[in-house]
Amino acid sequence: MKFIKILALLLLVSPTFAASELHTTLDLTSHWVGYFSLALFVVAYILVMAEEFTGFSKSKPVILAAGIIWGLIGWVYASEGLPHTAEIVLRHNLLEFAELFLFLLVAMTYIEAMRERKILESLKVWLINKGFTLRQLFWLTGFLAFFISPVADNLTTALIMGAVVLSVGGNNVRFISIAFVNIVVAANAGGAFSPFGDITTLMVWQKGVVEFDQFFALFIPSIVNFLVPAVIMHFAIKNEPSELLENSVVKVKEGGIGVVVLFTLTIATAVSFHNFLHLPPAMGMMMGLGYLMLASFFIRKFRGGECDIFNNLAKAEWDTLLFFFGVILSVGGLGFMGYLAMTSEMMYASLGATYANIVVGVLSAIVDNIPVMFAVLSMNPDMSLGQWLLVTLTTGVGGSLLSVGSAAGVALMGQSKGLYTFVSHLKWMPVIALGYAASILTHLWWSKELFNVSI
């Protein structure tokens, strides 16, 4: 009882601190703490980009950087007699991460459950057994990547299609490298027109700047982004039969189709919670996790099958989830210091929204699109819906310009064992850039009514 009274007192007192202290924020952009924090984040992100060569997990440097950055912020504010200001802002950043974390955790658990029920493996084997020619397989894997990534995610989709290409490509290095470039472009383009297709679109949706149905205005620009380079690469592939077939059948495990149905229902629940109940989508996803937990219980209890939901949870991409923690907290700290306001003034005020959003997309090919999009959302520039859709498009498809610019490209480089590399992707960057430009022009024309300000 005493604990409850103390907790109630804290809840009553803390808003008082919030109201009095939040009026005072410190500009640390010219303070040594600001310079040190900015340099620390740059070093941490260099280590993230070098993960493929160092084997140093990407979550480690950014989590350490986030802790040091916020420790320094807390020290400065406490020494200035503002002990609660940093705490309040940090709690807000933690809340943003918590919503993203719970949403992604449920989505990853469903993907693992479908993998464990052999849903994804059966799709791969079915494609392999059909005996398509290399050109047919090039287009089929591209279109499947484009249309699966909006529902699953671009990383998982790219890995599935990559496994198919490796199985049928045999020793044809040229075909495999070109097909992998096509898969990366298609998966990233497909993920750009759906809230579930990419982390950046999910962040935009959860922030509330673009509603669920408004994302579909990007469908035409996204498919243009995929088709322009695909049509050109098509002529670089010989129309010959595949070298390797896998004459086997994979049987979907008990309850596999039910898991797919429940995943669809979970997405519908998350959308309904957000659109109709005005609750965070993460709450709807957690309810969907409850669906899966009940289903796994009945599969074990009454069907005699093995379906361990906690094993699926354990197999989620924890390094990726913790990486998001480090990025969101680090960028949030730099933003609190004043760097994001400075950047927003330099980009959006100087260049204008359209050119700034195009530059943001190019930056996402060099730096991961997640911190880039989080920075834009934190800046919160005054833009029309058309401009918010434009930056959603550019950050989604801009990563295709380089193999290291998206999770799909990095994953396929690891999967291909040297058959698809940074250099092999770089050879096709001009045609990918052509698709990037074409998709932007298509959006500016196709959705011109959404730009209520001059572009």
Image (tube, rainbow, N blue to C red):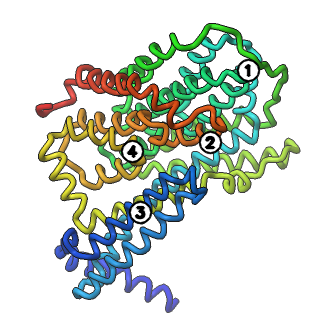
Q: Secondary structure at mark 4?
A: helix
Q: CA distance from mark 3 to mark 4?
A: 14 Å
Q: Residue at x 38, y 67 (%)?
A: 40
Q: Residue at x 33, y 39 (%)?
A: 362
- Identify the amino acid type marked 3: Val
Q: Using residue 80 as the reference point, say whether residue 130 is left or right of it.
A: right
Residue under label 4:
366
Percent of width and height locating residue 383: 19, 41
Percent of width and height locating residue 6: 43, 88
Q: Which residue is at the far top?
A: 239
Residue 367 visible in the picture: yes
State whether residue 199 is above or below residue 229: below
Q: Nearer the viewer, residue 349 or 41?
A: 41
State whether residue 251 is above or below residue 342: above
**CB contact under 8 Å: marks 1 and 3:** no
Q: CA distance from mark 2 to mark 4?
A: 18 Å
- Identify the amino acid type marked 2: Gly
- Mark found first going from the N terminus, 1 or 4: 1
Residue under label 2:
414
**CB contact under 8 Å: marks 1 and 2:** no
State whether residue 348 is above or below residue 243: below
Percent of width and height locating residue 296: 75, 47
Q: CA distance from mark 1 to mark 4?
A: 34 Å
- Identify the amino acid type marked 1: Ile
Q: CA distance from mark 1 to mark 3?
A: 43 Å
Residue under label 3:
43
Residue under label 1:
128
Percent of width and height locating residue 163: 68, 31
- Mark found first going from the N terminus, 3 or 2: 3
Location of the C terminus by quadrant is top left
- Mark found first going from the N terminus, 3 or 4: 3
